[in-house]
């Protein structure tokens, strides 16, 4: 694939390299609840700079082809670099072929130099269910791109997949950087946690529940939706929730009301943003920071310079939910959670 606009970087790519091997996620990222009570991460519905039609296509295609929590942002970044989300007036974006003659459409997909073959012929996908495939249509072009990226290694290795899309190191760096900007923009448009409503949820039904896509991890059933939201929005992974030693007996882990989190891709900058969003700062790091929203405390354990050196061998972010007094290994009478659709919760709620 080649970007459709002029670039200051030399494009010393062969026709083969031009082939876009394409295969056919608040507020920040939030949760979409299915009727069976399970959850899947969903991207924000809008991000500044991204037209609604394209945002919808990026989100739907990332989910369709299982590109992970951040998949929408990489698709959006490619759409930005290639055609400014279809707004570019360069040749080949809305009609015809690009300046190299190989590619077309808002995602600049190789179509056999206009023959309809090559990548487009092999991977074209109907993205909007209208029974047609149109390389110039946002839904079809994005779905085709998502399908190829999946085949090329995403979401396990985004750099590899993006390099397959366009064989240029500068292109990979630009797309990765743009994707990060979009994720940051999505996070910044979310409601402030200081203003986000919370609710006090009483007991009832089963006490502990497994966290979707986190094998073996259980939490108090009432906080599972919050935990999944954090995983989806910030790209983190849950390492511990309910349990005893080595956790403090008088803390929240024995109640199933604490989450230890690490970045899913090793990028601790993400975890820092999560920590700061919910109340952590360097000023209170050593003693523990009082949390915002439903959180009693936020601890940034073991990360260099961020408190609690005893956890330096296994750094993680610790969040504890506010709750009624309770004995270890019992259910708290009530817990405070974010006021959002939460079919895993039971009992009367009191909004605040």
Image (cartoon, helix red, strand yellow):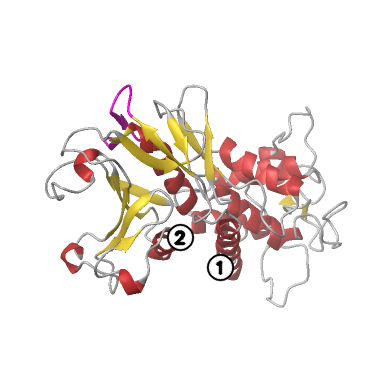
Residue occupying the point 72% across, 43% down: 120
Pick whichever, 325 or 18, lies toward us: 325
Badge 2 is on which residue? Answer: 277
The tag on residue 150 is none
- The quadrant holding residue 277 is bottom left
Give the left or right position of residue 135, taking residue 164 as reference: right
Residue 3, how many percent across, how many down? 72, 63
Disc 1, SS: helix
In the image, which is nearer the foreground, mark 1 or mark 2? 2
Badge 1 crowding class, 10 Å Cα cut-off, few under 14, some 14 to 19, many 20 or more, is some
Q: Quadrant of residue 206?
A: top left
Residue 256 locus on image (x, y percent) = 26, 39
Vertical relation: 338 (above or below) 271: above
Q: Inspect this view and state whether residue 63 appears.
A: yes
Q: What separation in Å lies between label 1 and label 2 (alpha carbons)?
A: 27 Å
Tell me where residue 282 appears, x and y as whole percent: 34, 73
Q: Are marks 1 and 2 in contact (CB under 8 Å)?
A: no
Q: Is residue 233 shown left or right of residue 22?
A: left
Q: Main secondary structure of the magenta part?
A: loop
Q: Residue at x 54, y 56 (%)?
A: 192
Q: Nearer the viewer, residue 315 or 291?
A: 291
Which residue: 59% across, 71% down? 170
157 left or right of 148?
left
Residue 2 visible here: no
């Amino acid at each position: 694939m080649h970007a459709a606009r002029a670039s200051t970087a030399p494009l010393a790519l062969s026709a083969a390299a031009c082939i876009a091997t394409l295969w056919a996620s608040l507020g920040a990222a939030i949760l979409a609840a299915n009727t069976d009570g399970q959850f899947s991460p969903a991207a924000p519905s809008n991000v500044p700079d991204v037209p609604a039609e394209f945002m919808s296509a990026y989100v739907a295609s990332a989910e369709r082809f299982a590109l992970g929590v951040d998949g929408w942002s990489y698709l959006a970044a490619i759409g930005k670099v290639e055609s400014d989300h279809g707004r570019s007036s360069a040749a080949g974006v809305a009609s015809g072929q690009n300046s190299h003659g190989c590619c077309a459409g808002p995602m600049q997909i190789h179509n056999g130099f206009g023959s309809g073959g090559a990548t487009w012929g092999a991977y074209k996908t109907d993205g909007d269910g209208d029974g047609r495939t149109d390389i110039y249509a946002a839904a079809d072009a994005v779905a085709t791109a998502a399908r190829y990226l999946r085949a090329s290694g995403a979401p396990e290795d985004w750099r590899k997949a993006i390099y397959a899309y366009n064989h240029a190191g500068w292109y990979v760096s630009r797309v990765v950087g743009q994707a990060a900007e979009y994720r940051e923009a999505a996070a910044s448009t979310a409601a402030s946690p200081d203003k986000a409503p919370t609710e006090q949820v009483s007991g009832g039904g089963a006490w502990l529940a497994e966290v979707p896509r986190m094998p073996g991890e259980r939490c108090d059933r009432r906080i599972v939706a919050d935990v999944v939201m954090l995983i989806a929005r910030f790209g983190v992974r849950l390492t511990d929730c309910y349990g005893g030693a080595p956790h403090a007996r008088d803390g929240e882990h024995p109640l199933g009301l604490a989450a230890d989190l690490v970045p899913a891709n090793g990028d601790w900058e993400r975890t820092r943003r999560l920590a700061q969003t919910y109340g952590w700062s360097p000023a209170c790091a050593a003693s523990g920071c009082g949390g915002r929203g439903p959180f009693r405390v936020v601890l940034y354990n073991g990360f260099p310079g961020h408190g609690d050196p005893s956890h330096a061998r296994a750094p993680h972010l610790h969040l504890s939910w506010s709750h009624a007094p309770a004995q270890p290994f019992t259910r708290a009478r009530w817990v405070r959670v974010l006021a959002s659709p939460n079919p895993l919760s039971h009992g009367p709620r009191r909004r605040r």
